[in-house]
Image (tube, grey):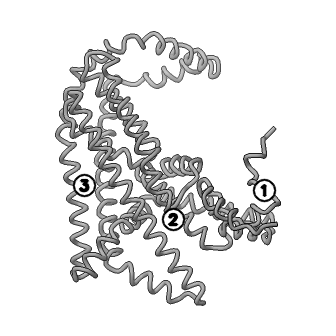
Amino acid sequence: MIDMQGLVPDGEGGAADDYPPPELQRAREMLARSSPSVPGVCLLLLTILATFYTLYFAAAIVLPFVLAGVLNLLLMPPMRLLNQKLRIPKPISALLLILLLFGIVGMIGLAISVPASGWISKAPQTLPALQQKLAFLRGPIDAAQHAMGRLQAMVQGTAGGGAHQAAQHGDGGLVGPMSSLGGIGSSLLIGTRAFLAQIFTTLLMLFFLLYEGDSLLRRFIEIMPTWADKRRAVQIASEVEHNVSLYLLTITIMNLLVGGANMIQCWALGMPNALLWGVVAFLLNYIPILGPMTGIVIYFVVGLFSFPSVLHALIPPAIYLGIHFLEGETITPMLLARRFTLNPVLVMASLMFWDWLWGIPGAFLSVPMLAVFKIVCDHIEALTPIGHIIGGAPKPRGLERMRRREPAT
């Protein structure tokens, strides 16, 4: 049985519930007025599915536009500084910011390319030592593989599996490897060309957003039919720009501190290429939850390559985990709590969904897009219930202030 005491606000039906937050009051009024019909709900579900279907298959063109829009929000404050304060023309200001962004990305790539290639080149020589250190895991892994093989044989049938394997290995022994190598080479070339095309599209779109984004927004506001619609559009645009740019700036600064702290700990522990692992920690921290988990695994594997014992190799990921908890659970939430809060369950769901849909760029964009969606929902009356659900934990201090303002009975 579900305990409803923690789900119902204190004083439900009493004085404390007479002063709900404005957004909660609007959400309740909207739900009270709405009467969704079955055809309307079905049409809404079909529209959502068609939208996600389009986003999946048109990712090559949609993703650069979305990434350029998020980068535009991050660069708008320095753009206004260059254009309005320093009186630099807009095209030159936009070009300078893009060159600065491109230079930062190039410096990061240069910092990690040489050490990373060194680690990749010496990996085959160090694999025997790594296998020897992890020899104590061989027994459990073999047992698990044996159990999985037996389970698969019970489900699929060993005869069908043997025939399928014979059909796979019946061809010549050289044709398969050669064709697979050719397929890998062509896939790499196609993937590299598509990646460079997306980067060029993102930078080109970012330039025009920085140069003419304000005029585009102004034109959009001009066609709004009423003054209330114009004001709402301005409020949504300004709040999205302020909150998302502040979020991106805050996490960028925190990620720099996390990368610096991990670089110092790698240098202090004697791990080679401390700069490389600091940059890796900086980049991975942009992806919530999955990024730090990947960083822990990477630091453990690097520790196995660098140190003589498994216990010694556990020290770098343990310190990495401590730094992440200090930053992710204490400092960053404290800095962002006054701007916007998001439900952790929906943050994780958004992360997993956009990572499946668009890969690593989608994981990076998941939190900013969820924050933008919440801001839009808060300003559109029909979507206020959804905005309230996306929001994080309620602020008890505001509730206490409302209680103190209650009239005496």
Q: What residue is shown at x 23% (from left), y 39% (from top)?
A: 276
Dot 1, how many residues are within 10 Å of its Cα: few (below 14), some (14-19), or many (20+)? Answer: few
Instruction: Assess disc 2: are there few (<14), some (14-19) or many (≥20) residues with their C-alpha within 10 Å of its C-alpha.
Output: some
Res 197 visible: yes
The residue at the point 78 percent across, 41 percent down is: 3
Disc sitting over residue 11 in the figure: 1
Q: Residue at x 75, y 53 (%)?
A: 10
* Residue 105 badge: 3
Specify whether residue 175 is in view. no
- Give the residue displayed 55% in from the left and 55% down from the top: 342
Can you give x and y, in whole percent of width and height, for residue 117 in the image? Answer: 20, 36
Helix, strand or loop at mark 1: loop
**Three-letter code for the amino acid on which mark 2 is drawn:** Val
Extreme-front residue of the structure:
408
Looking at numbered disc 1 in the image, what kind of residue is underneath it? Gly
Foreground residue among 401 and 21 = 401
What is the C-alpha distance between the residues marked 2 and 3?
25 Å
Q: Residue flagged by tag 3: what amino acid is it?
A: Val
Q: Which residue is mark 2?
A: 372
Quadrant containing the C terminus in the rendered view: bottom right
Among the two numbered marks 3 and 1 on one chain, the one whose residue lies closer to the N terminus: 1
